[in-house]
Amino acid sequence: MKLNFIPPTGIITVTVMIHCLQSLVLFIATIGSSSDLIYYLVLLLLLLLSGDVELNPGPITGNPKDILRTHSVKLTDAITTNLYRVTDALYAEGLIPLDTNENIQTVTGISDYRKSSQLVSVIQRELEASLNPEQYLIDICHVLINQQHFTLTDIATSILHQLGQSIPDNVSSHTVLPSPVDDISNTPVTNIRVVGAAATTGNVTSTRIFGKFRDKIRTTFGRLPYDVQGYADDMRQHYKHQPIVATDWPPRIGKDYFGRLALVEKQDSSTQAESAWHMLRGQVDKTVKLTGSKEISVEDVLQPTDSSLSLRVVIDGPPGIGKTKLCRKLLNMWSNGPLVHQQYDLVLYCPLRNSKIATATTLAGLFEYQCYEVPMVAEWFEKRNGEGLLIMFDGWDELSEQLRQSSLAASIICKEKLDQCSVIVTSRSYASSSLLKMDTLSRHVQVIGFSEEEISAVIIQTLQKDTKLAQELIDENTEQDEWRL
């Protein structure tokens, strides 16, 4: 069997590149190699061809001033999300004046985007005034790379390539290729740099072509596109630093022990009124024992139902009972690895008290933390109808009656949009009735407070040095329950 594995000589066009890819895949399929080899050989061919495609004539170097100008818009957007750290780092390296640093750090009444734009303008002026503009721009790039932010690193490496410079060893792992056989949270391969292949040219069209090929190969082998992976990794780091207890749920009470907030799955809405009555009187254990109620763990909140992997989970409870903390715990669990029952490529936390999120009309508008990648990430999930996405709408009761009827959040919850994503929506009990009537409801969970057993445990551990007093408090708590009866 004759295989056209060797590409024709002469100018390599996009058509020829596709032909070469097809030949390569056919060749590997014939010899029966593993998916790992296919993945890396196809990527290697793209790397080799990317500098010779007609649309990509090779490295284009230019004036540092022009290079910075062409990247100024993206740079302004990227710096906005890391403004104060970037400003401090630039000042520490002597790349911007002291007054610029002070103005950005202290001036109020100006948006971070405006400050970021002013910072980029200062960098441009400093570059023009520098005796060695190229070295100044190189130093700027190194500072950006040291921030370990996906977009900043991407921009900086692109500039360095246009200047003919090599990539530093401390480039963020977002810019290197993860192994196709390892989980994406594992250590990535560090000796294959993908950004370089696209960034060695100043031709935007060819870079986009390479990016599409690259992402197509990644998704074919079960990997996420780079923009999606980068944003997800950034959000994992953010969620890890949420102000919750990272290892224990329910949260700790005191220094050395913790109380357990009970979660109850409601399977019978006919007991809703009785449940609310017990909740009002603090009779947590009676709520658990109601017909159609069962206590569940936090891991089971997202357990798939028989009918669908795309969940709509309502979590309600009294004010201050721990609904937001439960969301943050789930975010923290996802940031530390796959959840027990389902794997999500991205988890979005959407506080509905934020007016921008409450009135958002597009998926991109639901992203609380905005950066350059957001439009591409949102578009990718929209094309998949939300598959692989978990959205947490926290605070349904914060919405006006009109927004509960006609907002984007309502459309997603009702599966009118993004029907393949999963949704958790929290609400105070008085506002959750409309949610519980949905045909799309998968699970109703109540956060109901502390059980008698846990209250006793807290009292005993609090008063370990005075067990008699601890027992008196337990007896008093029991007597109060009997009196309420």
Image (cartoon, rainbow, N blue to C red):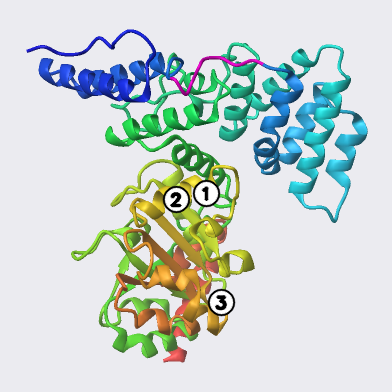
Identify the mark at residue 375; answer none if there is no mark.
1
The correct choice, above or below, for 222 with respect to 471 in the image is above
Q: Nearer the viewer, residue 319 or 16?
A: 16
Kindly indicate whether the residue at mark 2 contacts the one at mark 1 (C-beta within 8 angstroms). Answer: yes
Q: Secondary structure at mark 1?
A: helix
Tell me the residue at 36%/9% (across/down): 10
Label 3 belongs to which residue? 399
Mark 1 against mark 3, which lies toward the viewer?
1
C-alpha gap between disc 1 and disc 3: 25 Å
Label 2 belongs to which residue? 379
* Residue 422 image point, x, y percent: 36, 60
Q: Which residues are magenta?
A: 54-61
Q: Is residue 94 visible?
A: no
**Magenta portion: prevailing SS class:** loop
C-alpha gap between disc 1 and disc 2: 6 Å
* Residue 204 image point, x, y percent: 54, 30
Q: Secondary structure at mark 3?
A: loop
Is residue 359 left or right of 92 when viewed as pictured? left
Q: Nearer the viewer, residue 320 or 343?
A: 343
Looking at marks 1 and 3 on the same chain, the residue that comes earlier in the sequence is marked by: 1
